Amino acid sequence: MIIGTAGHIDHGKTALVKALTGVDADRLAEEKKRGITIDLGYAYAPLPDGSVLGFVDVPGHERFVHNMLAGATGIDLVLLVIAANEGIMPQTIEHLQIVDLLGIEHGIVALTKADLADDDMRGLRAAEVQMLLAKTRLADAPILPVSSVTGEGIAALQTLLSTFHTARERASGYPRLAIDRSFALQGTGLVVTGTLFSGEVRVDDRLMLSPKGIELRVRGLHAQNREAQSASAGERCALNITGARLGKEDIARGDWITAEELHAPTSVFDIRLKVLPSEKKPLKHWTPVHVHLAAAHAMGRIALLEGDKLEPGGEAFAQVMLDAPIGALANDRLIIRDQSAQWTIGGGTVIDPFASPRNRRKPERLIRLDHMVRSTEEAARRLLDKAPGYFEYRPFAVAYNLKTAEADQLWRSADAVIAGPLIFGKSQWISARQALVSTLATHHQSAPEQPGLQPERLRNAMDPRLAKEAFAEVLAAELKIGGVAVDGPWLRLPTHVVRLSKDNELRWRHIEQIIRAQRFRPPRVRDFAEALDIAEEDVRTLMRRVARMGRVIEVAHDHFFLRETVAEMIRIAADIGAADPSSEITAAAFRDRIDSGRKVAIQILEFFDKQGITIRRGDRRRIRPDRVSYFGEAA
Ligand SMILES: Nc1nc2c(ncn2[C@@H]2O[C@H](COP(=O)(O)OP(=O)(O)O)[C@@H](O)[C@H]2O)c(=O)[nH]1
Ligand SMILES: [Mg+2]
């Protein structure tokens, strides 16, 4: 278990840690000289049962709240120190607010310097403290008078601490350690210390310095101040690390050491934000702030997602936009302080670590965030059950720090369908596929002359409309089982054949008779338009439709031949070639055989060239025997 001190400067935090552990946590020369704590201090106390209590001693001066914050994340229990002679002071309140915003649930209040207070004073302090704690998570925290000078209450406090055993929520998942200190040791090399937030670290593990993304290996480790082969979530660790591209200057407080899988730097993330009730003014949209997350500290802005301001004591979804990326995952706690780093505005919990400023205030986005403000299982279930019913599963697994096996287990129990990079709720998947097929069916019914719909048109016609990636997966699944067929650029149901409308069917029958009778010399579109007294454009559209049905071929512009006539003309060309000593097909011979004009004969031969039925070199043209039945059987 890790215990952190909190409280106003000079109230006896460091003296109390020394009384409990024998260790003077003020380690810097300047700290010793000035008698104040500036940076974090660490101390350990072995317990009779063999376990070890770890202490993080923090500075109480308002100027060093950023250091206090780096120490306060990752603690299990807060030792709130209040001097009995002075009582509640500004940083007592700020530290308590921070601890409460960080979600730390266990605490003990040490009324220090008890030797300087009589019974009346102690009673008064205890009453004041109870009032202060009343609205926080620590409302029921025990209050204990202690003195580091006389030793009063120290043994009682030790006993109380040893009875606290808190279980870590995140023993599972990949390892993630928040670095609060780094240094180089002669003969050992690089050492980092910090709290392991999740998972396990073992000697020889290959991990990553994040967000910088530098690979490293664990050469050795200490857990709770003892040499060990492995450390688990909730323990303070010192890791001896090495990496080909890793130098001391690469490592800073606030960096993470993580499994490669969790290395996912982010500078835009959505949070559930609480503004402290003690704030004087509402928090405005786009306020510049300092953001503290685990041991990291960054500058950025707060975009409010619900309304343009958030009243003191209020809570809402917000988006954090940082100047530089950090490592943040779902459920991480963060504290925001004002731009000049003078006071704490509020804090919150990361909901979606990989957000985007695009459409951030859209209702769908807020609903999605609302689904995600829950346990991992519940979030997954809601995202899969409720519209749109699909999401990218890899970022989700990273956000919630799920190992592959843990994620697979979750998807199995949610009865979900994995499709490419997406995961769909079963019923959402089924209904999306049905919607795609039925949308096509509806289209065919209302437009029997159309060959089908192009993919993007189909996507837009669907209700509800799927996002592009989701549509692609649903379509791929239908194509695979043959639920949908492709015709060039068109999608259609496999049963769909282009049919002419009644009017067009009548017109076509009339035209067909003429084309058939004229055989090698069919009239052109313009001729039919005149004969039938309809617009040229309408004849052209009709003929193209009939062409798509495979009944006629547009040999030259606006000049359609029956399919079987084209097949017959290919046979004629083949005959000419066969009869010629050098297999040559001349335009003159071809014209004679089809009894047509020279211009038309040449157009037909050029059409054959384009289709690869004949090959033309210079003036010589030959048939390709393998293409003779390209247009089917002759009449
Ligand atoms: N009389 C008395 N003085 C104390 C006690 N604990 C600490 N002090 C003194 O208070 C001053 C500040 O103590 P320190 O532990 O550095 O406070 P911190 O700033 O909260 O870490 C020092 O001069 C200590 O000697 C106590 O229990 N009784
Ligand atoms: Mg101190």
Image (cartoon, rainbow, N blue to C red):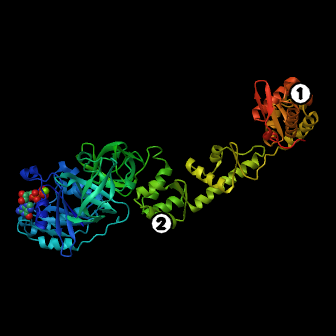
Quarter holding residue 220 = bottom left
- Towards the viewer: 153 or 127: 153
- Towards the viewer: 91 or 572: 572
Q: Residue 94 at what x, y percent from top left? A: 22, 54
Left or right of 227 in this view: 544: right
Q: Is disc 1 placed on a helix, strand or loop?
A: helix
Q: Residue 404 at what x, y percent from top left? A: 44, 61
The amino acid pointed to by label 2 is Gln
Quarter holding residue 138 = bottom left
- Residue 283 got which mark? none
Residue at 58% x, 59% y is: 428
In this view, the residue farthest toward the bottom is 49
Q: Residue 301 at what x, y percent from top left? A: 34, 43
Q: Is disc 2 placed on a helix, strand or loop?
A: helix
Looking at the figure, which quarter contains the C terminus? top right
**Distance of mark 2 from mark 1, alpha carbons?**
75 Å
Q: Residues within 10 Å of mark 1 (few under 14, many from 20)?
A: some
N-terminal label among 2 and 1: 2
- Towards the viewer: 191 or 203: 203
- Residue 589 got which mark? 1
- Assess whether mark 1 and mark 2 are in contact (beta carbons under 8 angstroms): no
Residue 190 appears in view? yes
- Residue 409 got which mark? 2
The amino acid pointed to by label 1 is Ala
Left or right of 594 in this view: 104: left
Residue 313 appears in view? no
Residue at 60% x, 52% y is: 464
